[in-house]
Image: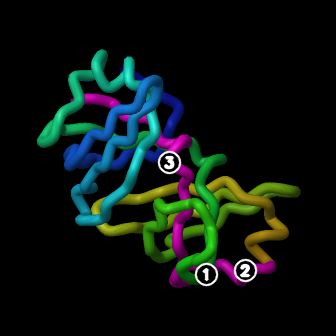
Amino acid sequence: MSLSIRNQLPGTVTAVTRGEAMATVKVRLDGGQDITAAITADAVTDLGLTTGAAVRALVKSTEVSLATDAVEGVSIRNQLPGTVEGVAAGGAMASVRVTVEGGELTAAITKEAVTDLGLAPGSAVVALIKSTEIALEAV
């Protein structure tokens, strides 16, 4: 299947917590980081997700925020440290490539944010991703 979602990180399911309609799925990425995806309970069943299942975490670049340090006092639990590999800025928006353990993420952020954060190749950043913005693909 071909997808327009560039951010695709492989991992293994470490826990599934089902609710009535929604579930949280904890995933250990191949780089060693832990993330949580919030998906429907039906999707857990349809994908056959159980502990040990191989998955790919999919995140649109518009759903990746960047910070220059870990963030406290925020509900976003998925915080992946990384290093800026490249910045491609246009008139209003920028595409920032970030290397994280085990892969690469792209964040689509405003050009103003790139300037305000001082982002350039080699900059240390933390990629922030809400659990509701992570889709999972069974592999």
Residue visible at 31% across and 68% down in the picture: 101
Q: Are marks 2 and 1 in contact (CB under 8 Å)?
A: yes
Residue 68 in picture, x, y percent from top left: 61, 81
Tell me the SS state at disc 1: loop
Q: Residue furthest left?
A: 52
Residue 36 in picture, x, y percent from top left: 39, 50
What residue does disc 2 label?
Answer: 117
> How many marks are shown on the rendered structure?
3
Left or right of 131 on screen, residue 104:
left
In the rendered view, how is the structure colored? rainbow
Q: Is residue 82 magenta?
A: no
Residue visible at 79% across and 77% down in the picture: 115
Three-letter residue code for mark 3: Ser
Report the Cα–Cα distance between label 3 and label 1.
Answer: 20 Å
Q: Quadrant of residue 33?
A: bottom left
What residue does disc 1 label?
Answer: 68
The image's mark for residue 131 is: 3
> Which residue occupies the foreground of this view, 28 or 116?
28
- Name the image quarter holding the N terminus: top left
Which portion, as a residue range, is magenta? 116-139
Left or right of 96 on screen, residue 36:
left
Tell me the SS state at disc 2: helix
Q: Residues within 10 Å of mark 1 (few under 14, many from 20)?
A: some
Q: Are marks 3 and 1 in contact (CB under 8 Å)?
A: no
